[in-house]
Image (cartoon, helix red, strand yellow):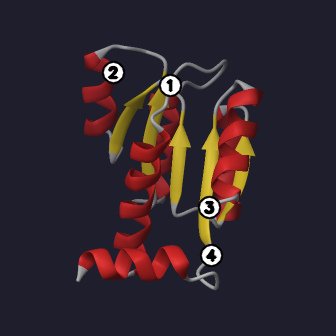
Amino acid sequence: MAKRRILEIMLNKTVKKRLLIVDDEQEICEFLADYFNGSGYECMVSLNGEDALAKTKLFRPHVILLDIKMPGIDGIEVLRRIRSFDTFVGVIVVTGVLDEGIGRQALKEGAVDFITKPIDLEYLEHSILAKVVSILT
C-alpha cells in the first residue's frame, strides 16, 4: 500500500512537491534544482542561511536540503531557527563534512536525514519522497 501511494504521488503532476535547496555553492544548487525540477518538484534555491529562513516562510517547502558549512549562519543554526516556526518541514542535511558528531547533532535538532557529499541522487530522491509522502498523506 505504501509503495502504491508513493507511486501515485510521484506520478501526480497536480501535487506540487516543493523543495528548497540551501547551499553556498551555486553550482550544487543549480545541479540539484535542475535534477529535481526534471522529477516534478518545484524548486527554490538559497545561497545562505538568512535567505533560507526567509524563503522557508515564503515558499513553505515540503523538504529542505540544507548544507552545514555556509558563511554567516551555519546549517545547524538555520535548522534550529526553522524548527522554531515550522516543525513539519522535512530537513535533510546534505554536507561535505564527514563528522558523525555533526550528523548526530543535526538529527537531534530535527533533521530527518543526514547525507554526505558526493551525493547519491537515488538515495536522496528516495529520502525526499518519503518525507513528501508523510506530509501529503
Q: Which residue is mark 3?
A: 39
Name the mark nearer the viewer: 4 or 3.
Answer: 3
Q: Residue at x 50, y 48 (%)?
A: 82
Q: Which residue is mark 4?
A: 16
The kind of residue tagged 4 is Lys
Res. 68 mark: 1
Q: Secondary structure at mark 3?
A: loop
Q: CA distance from mark 2 to mark 4?
A: 31 Å
Q: Secondary structure at mark 2?
A: helix
Confirm whether residue 40 shows in the render: yes
Marks 1 & 2, CB-CB < 8 Å contact:
yes
Q: Which residue is mark 2?
A: 102
Mark toward the start of the polypeptide (2 vs 3): 3
Q: CA distance from mark 1 to mark 3?
A: 25 Å
The kind of residue tagged 2 is Ile
Classify residue 67 by image quadrant. top right
Crowding at mark 3 (Cα within 10 Å: few <14, some 14-19, many 20+): some
Marks 2 & 4, CB-CB < 8 Å contact:
no
Q: Position of residue 137 (x, y in %)?
A: 36, 82
